[in-house]
Amino acid sequence: MTGPMTGSAPTAEGNGAADDPVGPLLARLARLRDRVGTLVDARSAGDPTAADPLRGLYLSDEAVRHHLRQPAGSRPQEDPAGEGDEADEAAEPHHGDRLGRLAHRFGLTALDTTILLIAVAPDLDRGFEPLYGYLNDDVSRRRATTGLALDLCGLLAPGAADSGARGRFHPSAPLSGHGLLLVEETERPFLSRSLRVPDRVAAHLLGDDTADAALAGYVTALPAPGAPAAVDDPLAGKLAARLDAGPLTVYLREHREGDGLACATAALSAAGRGALHFSPADTAPAAAHDPHGNPEGAGHTEPAALGPVPQLLREARLRDCAIVVSPLPERPGPLIRALAAPDVQVLFGGTRPYDPQWCDQDPLVLDAPRLRSGATDAWAAELGIGTDLDAGFDLADAVAPYRLGSDRIRRAARAARDLAALDGGPLTADHLRLAARQQSASGLERHARRIRPDVGWDDLVLPDGPLTYLRELALRARHRDRVLGDWRLSAGGGRGRGVLALFAGDSGTGKTLSAEVVAADLGLDMYVVQLSSVVDKFVGETEKNLERIFTEADRTDAVLLFDEADAVFGKRSEVKDAHDRYANLESAYLLQRLEAFDGIALLTTNLRANIDDAFTRRLDLIVDFPFPDAEQRLALWRHSLVHVPCADGIDPGPCARDFELAGGSIRSAVVTAAYAAAGRGEPVSDADLLAGARREYRKAGRLVLDDMGW
């Protein structure tokens, strides 16, 4: 799991022990104190109330007459602005001087930098508080005001402050616009408004890079530069080179959710850039319709719905890092416009095509490369293999089915180590697979029933032919990225890299069990599609339900099972009325959707002839499950009795010979026999097996002779 942003998060500030932010800052404050002292001396000269201990709490007649004798906006003879050293220093970024680097990143002028230092001084040195109270002529106002800041800068002209200087406090000016300075008490006259520097900025100047509390729950730090990436694609390298050239806004169109985040992470890591991953708060569909007809609702999204965008931009500038936004909200236009700053690198990742109405200045639009399964190097780096951990298993084989980004790999690796610690043993492939499945969880359970496989190849009793096909199916699922992607054997035309297979055979011949075994071999969960949640009598609703399932399956590492698939994948019929036309539209939709599917989908049917020929052409494998012969039936009986207490000398041979039952029926017969034996408190006997076999024969509607079975 990506950790919270703390002082150890990626930042360009880190110079180790050589980075001493306090020393240069104290030197600046010392020079500012001298300047304040000069102004105090000038103010107190000739002031009859200078020695009054209650000065600032009331105005005496003598004090009023003194103020009337002073020219408006007067300032001391010696200009405390310091036209030399301080202004020159503020204009140049300093190595080891955080205020100078901050000024450089935020585009501050020398005057802006001085104003910022004046405003933050009471937060860094409490000795400025009484001085500011004296200069404000109010002991309760211990922060700088706009008038005091201008006076200390020598810019308080007779009658009014210089218009250019006053503009440095405008809400759109760099200081306020970037969130570095807050001008408070706006109901007061301009020159008496208080100035406050946010605590996050003051902490940064002191060397503390703990993230702003407003970003909690929205932002996490992405991997540090140089971390192994989960995506290896030429596009990531090209993007890294472009990011090196300067600030850039990028939109990465995702084929599968997470592709853009993985590509952005890889590019930023290669470019040596830290990044903040921002997850917007508004990810739900918009309820209101834009009255201006703009589908993105430009200018009509509440700022609060976007999350703390101003604080995010300020944090990125303070850390000198990029921003990665994924996933995008339902209406991304306002967010993209708010974050598209010319001096900050921002990378967006979304599954929808880019819409020019989202913003005025188009970002660089790219198609994110698909996440590859495996990413063994990233897994090995997170697990520490080769340094302090001896894997003891085939890592590449264990993680081959999973398409996870760098952040998910990190979280899965941590969860796997926690699971191993809980078991009190070394890390195993099972720990990795369980942790990876947790990171790939999705909303499929709203439409399908999840099965966590707990079977293996030894649980299958099948002829060599079907077993060979099933192992090939698992092989295809593991190596599809290499064969269809790297070796460019995809059929093109937008065809996905999914693996599709049809299991055909009589009921009870092992189709569903085989699907579960394949899922277990791949280390994936299996989701059985509930037809009741798919089929709808209203036109078009079935297609919508199926689209939800396929969309969720595309972003989930799992095996999708359509049991009794002929209910939705049946043959198209001749169009005789409107019902036939809409039924055929459903089949046409499925044909198109299967072409673009990226996951693993298995279909089962009792009658292969019921499946439309167009579907079978798009299948990678068709596995026929034959009805078991006597030898296979005997193996099935014995396999079902492995964990059942049996009487001495029990022989299921006669049942296997005389009762032509499929594997599912044989298991049901054994269950019936086990219940009968458990009721007597005895082991299962031959008579119990015979009774169970006869029960299954009668359930199938077949004739049972009295002498059948012995």
Image (spheres, rainbow, N blue to C red):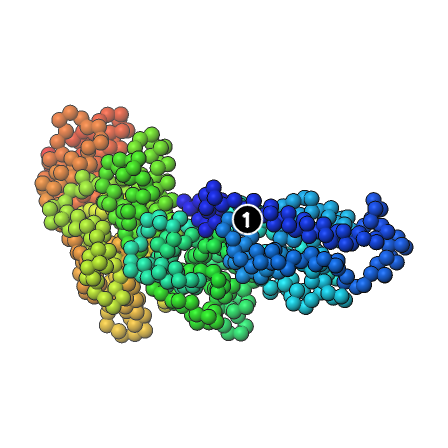
Residue at point 35% right, 54% down? 270
In the picture, measured across the screen, residue 90 lies left or right of residue 530, that is: right
* Image location of residue 213, percent across then percent down: 55, 48
Residue at point 56% right, 59% down? 91
* Res 557 seen here: no
Q: Tell me the quadrant of the picture where the C terminus can be found.
A: top left
In the picture, measured across the screen, residue 412 lies left or right of residue 619, that is: right
Q: Write down the quadrant of residue 501 in the picture.
A: bottom left
Nearest the eye: 98 or 475: 98
Q: Tell me the quadrant of the picture where the N terminus can be found.
A: top left
* Image location of residue 584, percent across then percent down: 28, 69
* Image location of residue 461, percent across then percent down: 15, 42
In the picture, measured across the screen, residue 84 lies left or right of residue 441, that is: right
Residue at point 41% right, 54% down? 273
As displayed, is residue 705 above or below residue 152?
Answer: above
As displayed, is residue 419 above or below residue 596?
Answer: above
Residue at point 75% right, 62% down? 189
Label 1 belongs to which residue? 204
* Image location of residue 427, percent across then percent down: 30, 35
Q: Residue furthest right?
A: 61
Amino acid type of the residue tagged 1 in the rendering: His
In the picture, measured across the screen, residue 81 lies left or right of residue 2, that is: right
* Res 56 seen here: yes
Nearest the eye: 540 or 706: 540
Nearest the eye: 544 or 601: 601
